[in-house]
Amino acid sequence: MKTIKKYIFLIATVASLFISGCSEDFLDIKPAGKVDELSFFSDTTNVDMMVSGVYNTFLYKENCDIYDYVRWWLGDVASDMSEAGGDSPTAWGEGYSYDDLSYTAEASILKAIYGSMFNGVNRATQVIENLPQARQLAGDEMKKKIDIRMGEAHFLRAAYYFILARVFGGVPIVDHILLTSEYKTLPRGTIKDVYTLMEKDLKAAIHYLPLESQIAATEKGRASKGAAQALLAKMYVYESSYFTYYGSADPRMGAVQNRWKEAYDMCLEVINSKEYELVGANGETFNTFWSPTTNGFRYLFSVEGNNNKESIFAVQHIHSTGYGNYSFGCALNQFVGPRALIRKDGSFPTQGDHAWGFWVPTHKLYNLFDPNDVRRKVAIGQGPDPETGYPGDSVYGQVTVNGKKVTGFFVIANTTYQATGLENMKYEIGPHNSMIIDGGFQGNTQNMYYIRYADVILLAAEAAMMLDDQANASKYFNMIRARARNCGDGIHPADLAGNVTKQDIMDERAREFAMEGERFFDLVRWKEAYNNINGSTMEWWKNNPSYNGITITYHDKNDFYPIPAIETSKNNNLKQYQGW
């Protein structure tokens, strides 16, 4: 078992010495005595456990992983490319509110995300402040360990702040262990303020962290130098996008700058390191539960593909069973898997033969793909279509027939209620968990990407385009298409001919990262959310006469989600953006 995953189980007993749980009092972390802290941090095992505790924030559960909620509800359902789904239009009331943009500052998911991400920020800050003091007392080998763990803490603080800034915009800046007087008086910073701290942290992380190839197999899952470089490149792209499309006069942004050149150069640092690759770019196949010759793009979204050569940083999961005991596993596929499967004899399954069907693609996303683009089938599934004769896609599951369990691949069933008639297929991972096995629920071992190499390649293409370097914009843009083509029929999608445009970047990112939680945040940074969401009609509304004619209204305030009301009520210096 991977060392980082092993420590997940151990940190619970020691984390309480230094850090609070995820709650509205997330900033109220009472420092422990210095002598005790230094004694604690002088032990190698304790250092490893505490830093693993910083990673562990990603695994905080609010029914599902908090990081998955960020990608699912806020990054995708709020966009034009997916809908809430479930067994009825309002099966998950709050989830549906991100579909029609009716959410408020009272939303429990927003509260959980805000609190848990700041919990991670504070955990990292505790480590960053204590390790240098412990280092002074350490021997040479311990100093090396401390330096690497220090780099990880800097990276993780930046990673949590990047989520906070994408979701809420500017937030309070916590760069030290807070004094009691600061807990409930910190003002809201600008996005530039957040990025200034992120840049400092990521440059420190780059200095301390090893290359991916230098991390032992037992340590895979920890942050690398490439992870810090990739996140810094992405941060530069976001800052440059805000500068380009909003300007530095927008009070939410602060003094953002044009950093496209820095973004491009940092992407090249990752690319030229040769540490990562686009999996399947040369037509390689892999052995997974799907097939012994699974294409590279499908492989990316399988348990067998965990920590592959394209994975720059991913949330690590291990197997843990039962709804009340999946703290270290991922249960996303239970939430988003198809509602039902068709038995081999063609009969309809019982109610127990299903997952929950949330987070479903829209036909706008479906129609964006070339029909022969392999990425569409990896991301989107559907049941039989009697009009076109399409037989339906299959997933791995188990149904009960005449009292006996039958396991294997079954065709997705069309159910009475379907939000869009399409299913999310990137999180269907077959025999590695109990999804669609008699309604059972348990965690599974599929890792969830925070950033993968394809993102760096497309960010390089976008930055080159913004720098009027069309040769390199086309080069990197078509690397993505070539990989998709070589994972499929070798023909589709064709290379883009001519200059790369903003619309080309927008569409290709939608295809490459379909159902991965990037779409809404991309639309906002491009200032394209209003153009793509306002006036649109959800697909389930179109099929329900009771909602005929209802359209979505997008306001400027929807660029960022409101800070939870529980936080602003306790801190008079924490102000909502206009409209909230």
Image: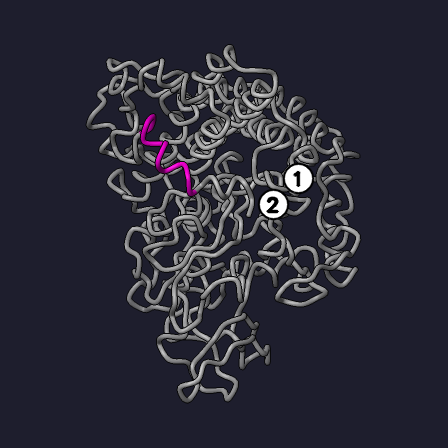
Q: Residues within 10 Å of mark 2 (few under 14, many from 20)?
A: many
Residue 276 location, quadrant = top right
Residue 448 showing in the rendered view: yes
State the image quarter where residue 252 is shown.
top left
| Label number found at residue 130 | none
Picture coordinates of residue 345, whole percent (x, y): 50, 89
Q: Secondary structure at mark 2?
A: helix
Question: In the picture shown, does residue 488 fall above or below 235?
Answer: below
Q: Amino acid at mark 1?
A: Leu
In percent of width and height, residue 410 lies at 53, 76
Q: Which residue is mark 2?
A: 509
Specify start and end residues of the magenta stretch as a single range. 9-19
Q: Is there any visible trace of residue 253 in the rendered image?
A: no
Task: Give percent across and percent down for residue 163.
Answer: 45, 34
SS of the residue at dot 1? helix
Which residue occupies 73% across, 34% down? 271
Residue topped by disc 1: 458
Mark 2 and mark 1 residues within 8 Å of each other at the beta carbon: yes
**With respect to residue 74, does 282 lie above or below?**
below
Q: Bin the neighbour count of mark 1 within 10 Å (Cα to Cα): few under 14, some 14-19, many 20 and up.
A: many
**Residue drawn where x is 32% and y is 69% of the image:** 545
The answer to which of 333 and 6 lies nearer the viewer is 6
Q: Is residue 415 magenta?
A: no
Measure the alpha-carbon separation of dots 2 and 1.
7 Å
What amino acid type is highlighted by mark number 2? Arg
